[in-house]
Image: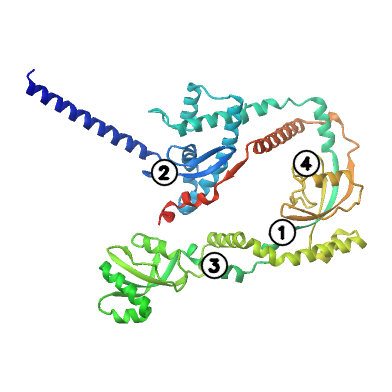
């Protein structure tokens, strides 16, 4: 081959190599866009720290375990909620579920690493393809591998055939007899209590919620009434904004007659052609002027909000959301507002009981709620009142309360307990055991309930122990950034 042909050959080879390299880069980029936590193209994802478990930080970023968890959850919930909730609400639900799963999986994963437990490559491939349902047509990235290891730790430690269940020994005859006796050992008790949240909520009026809506209507109103001016050119739009600032809205319109289009009664909805204006309106209050001209539908728009959808015309779901948000955002102020009233109610009950142990009458005098419950036993999973309704206060979850009920003398009145959003006074009335019980009457159902009781108790204690060993922190300030990335980008 002569020198000229050699040069042409190497030039051609070089071009083929360069084009092939560029092609591979494009392919890898496109493949990278295929997966997104929200089921859409995700060319750029800002990285945000989401959860820290002990010393390990888990983030929202491309190819992270959290991204894959969000994708898994979306597959499960999208069909159920599509058309019923807005995209932002679906995202909020998915992120909340993802964080809860990430914390549980993360604790188990760190515990498994401390124990030296990890999956084989074959086992990991099986988990990724079946449980996580990802097609392995290429080498998995680190996030998918880590999520696979997390799922493996979950299956090995707390799955149906995991170590936790296997650590629970089979039910012995002695345990069965003891459980049967405890089940037939019943206590009757009376309770005076205030559920602080319900107490406050019951005093909220329609007027309170309406005032909150008027201040925050932009978040909830499905449409907005507005006055709007439109112009074709950007310079004209900004000049009109200057006129508004100098002269006011009405005089600015008067000055620019013939150069602007004016609509005194525009309705802004979340529909094509109005997206930018609707997003801006959601952040505005009644009477507010848009911060800057918005270019939409081939024109520049300057508008001010004149009204929102009246609260009475909102859907029931939206009204509930407004009420819940009002309680959540104003709770501490409401608590302070009713604190004296709550203390007076408790004081009245305590003073009455010093002279008269009648809990029912004390309830009438003080305004505290009254409940009488029977068939309470040391292995109860639910406590009901005499009408069969579940008792509203968390008696079974509080060891101090249970100790008082089962260790105090009959008709003893407890101190006033302040805990978990409840204020409670209790009285143990009587304890009794079924003298006619016979071990021959024990049925399979009793053995099943004992097994379930042992598993629930063991799992609960184990998870508490894990949470203590691997403390976690959620980066709350970053949550909304991934629920509404577009809003936070503006």
How many numbered marks, from 0 up?
4
Neighbor class of circle 2 (other Cα within 10 Å; few <14, some 14-19, many 20+) is: few
Identity of the residue drawn at 82% across and 38% down: 183
Find the distance from the CA under tag 1 to the CA under tag 2. Answer: 41 Å
Residue 341 appearing in the image: yes
| Residue at the farthest top position | 1
Tell me if 406 is positioned left or right of 333 in this view: right
Q: Callout 2: helix, strand or loop?
A: loop
Find the distance from the CA under tag 4 to the CA under tag 1. Answer: 25 Å
Residue for badge 2? 39
Residue 380's label in the rendered image is 4
Q: Quadrant of the N terminus?
A: top left
Q: Callout 4: helix, strand or loop?
A: loop
Find the distance from the CA under tag 3 to the CA under tag 1. Answer: 24 Å
Residue for badge 3? 213
The answer to whether residue 67 is above or below residue 482 is: above
Between discs 4 and 1, the one toward the N terminus: 1
Q: Callout 3: helix, strand or loop?
A: helix
Contact check, label 3 and label 1, Cβ < 8 Å:
no
Find the distance from the CA under tag 2 to the CA under tag 3. Answer: 33 Å
Find the distance from the CA under tag 4 to the CA under tag 3. Answer: 44 Å
- Of circles 2 and 4, the one toward us is 2
Residue for badge 1? 196
Tell me if 432 is positioned left or right of 285 in this view: right
Identity of the residue drawn at 58% across and 24% down: 116
- Image quadrant where residue 362 sits: bottom right
Between discs 4 and 3, the one toward the N terminus: 3
Contact check, label 2 and label 3, Cβ < 8 Å:
no
Between discs 3 and 1, the one toward the N terminus: 1
């Amino acid at each position: 081959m002569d020198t000229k042909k050699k040069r042409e050959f190497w030039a051609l080879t070089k071009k083929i190599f360069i084009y092939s390299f560029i092609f591979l880069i494009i392919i890898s980029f496109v493949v990278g866009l295929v997966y997104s936590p929200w089921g859409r193209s995700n060319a750029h994802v800002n990285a945000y720290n989401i959860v820290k478990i002990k010393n390990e930080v888990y983030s929202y970023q491309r190819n992270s375990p959290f991204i894959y968890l969000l994708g898994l959850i979306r597959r499960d919930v999208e069909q159920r909620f599509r058309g019923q909730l807005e995209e932002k609400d679906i995202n909020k639900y998915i992120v909340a579920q993802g964080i809860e799963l990430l914390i549980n999986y993360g604790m188990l994963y760190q515990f498994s690493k401390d124990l030296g437990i990890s999956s084989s490559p074959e086992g990991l491939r099986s988990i990724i393809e079946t449980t996580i349902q990802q097609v392995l047509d290429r080498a998995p990235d680190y996030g998918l591998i880590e999520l696979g290891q997390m799922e493996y730790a979950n299956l090995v430690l707390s799955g149906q055939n995991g170590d936790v269940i296997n650590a629970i020994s089979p039910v012995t005859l002695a345990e069965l007899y003891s459980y049967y006796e405890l089940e037939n050992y019943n206590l009757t008790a009376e309770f005076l209590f205030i559920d602080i949240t319900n107490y406050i909520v019951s005093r909220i009026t329609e007027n309170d919620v309406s005032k909150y809506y008027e201040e925050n209507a932009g978040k909830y109103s499905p449409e907005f009434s507005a006055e709007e001016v439109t112009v074709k050119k950007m310079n004209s739009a900004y000049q009109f904004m200057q006129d508004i600032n100098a002269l006011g809205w009405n005089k600015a319109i008067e000055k620019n007659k013939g150069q602007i289009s004016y609509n005194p009664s525009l309705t802004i909805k979340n529909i094509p052609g109005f997206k930018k204006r609707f997003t801006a309106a959601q952040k505005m209050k009644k009477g507010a002027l848009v911060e800057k001209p918005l270019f939409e539908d081939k024109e520049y728009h300057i508008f001010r909000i004149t009204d929102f959808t009246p609260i009475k015309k909102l859907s029931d779901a939206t009204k509930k959301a407004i009420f819940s948000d009002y309680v959540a955002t104003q709770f501490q102020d409401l608590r302070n507002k009713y604190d004296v009233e709550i203390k007076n109610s408790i004081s009245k009950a305590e003073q009455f009981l010093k002279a008269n142990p009648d809990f029912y009458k004390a309830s009438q005098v003080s305004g505290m709620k009254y409940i009488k419950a029977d068939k309470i036993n040391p292995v109860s999973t639910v406590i009901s009142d005499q009408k069969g309704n579940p008792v509203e206060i968390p008696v079974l979850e509080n060891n101090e309360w249970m100790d008082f009920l089962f260790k105090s003398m009959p008709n003893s009145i407890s101190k006033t307990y302040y805990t978990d959003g409840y204020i409670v006074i209790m009285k143990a009335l009587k304890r009794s055991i079924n003298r006619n019980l016979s071990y021959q009457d024990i049925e399979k159902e009793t053995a099943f309930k004992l097994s379930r009781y042992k598993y629930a108790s063991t799992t609960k204690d184990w998870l508490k122990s894990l949470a203590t060993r691997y403390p976690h922190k959620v980066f709350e300030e970053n949550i909304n950034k991934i629920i509404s990335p577009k809003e936070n980008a503006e």
